[in-house]
Image: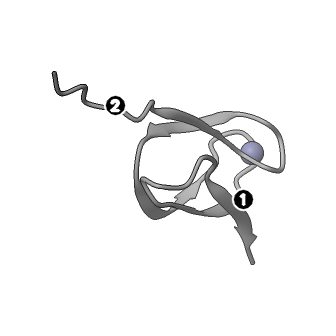
Amino acid sequence: MISQKKEKMEKIKCPQCGLTLIFARHIEAEMKCKRCRKIIRIQKETSEEHAQTELVK
Ligand SMILES: [Zn+2]
């Protein structure tokens, strides 16, 4: 029997204010937080457990 491992969607939050920005399995993007108006660079490979987020100046 083949069991398919499904990666969960991760809730990705703004590192500045904690607002949820997006849910994703795999992402490479820059998003503007609606609350604090910072631009956040988000990177997450499917194999990685947690997304990396950093503020873009
Ligand atoms: Zn924010």
Q: Residue at position x 46%, y 60% from top?
A: 45
Mark 1 CB near ligand 1 (8 Å cut)? yes
Judged left or right of residue 25, residue 57 is: right
| Circle 2 Cα neighbour tier, 10 Å, few/some/many (<14 / 14–19 / ≥20) | few
Which quadrant would the N terminus be assigned to in this image? top left
As measured in the structure, the alpha-carbon distance from the residue carrying label 1 to the one carrying label 2 is 32 Å
Q: Look at mark 2 in the image and give the residue it sits on.
A: 6
- Expressed as whole percent of the image width and height from the top left, the position of residue 6 reads 34, 31
| Circle 1 Cα neighbour tier, 10 Å, few/some/many (<14 / 14–19 / ≥20) | some
Q: Quadrant of ligand 1?
A: top right
Q: Residue at position x 25%, y 25% from top?
A: 3
Q: Look at mark 1 in the image and give the residue it sits on.
A: 38
Judged left or right of residue 1, residue 11 is: right
Displayed quadrant of residue 41: bottom right
Which quadrant would the C terminus be assigned to in this image? bottom right
- Given residues 27 and 45, the one toward you in this image is 45
Q: Residue at position x 72%, y 59% from top?
A: 38
- Expressed as whole percent of the image width and height from the top left, the position of residue 4 reads 25, 30
- Expressed as whole percent of the image width and height from the top left, the position of residue 33 reads 64, 48
Which residue type carries mark 2?
Lys
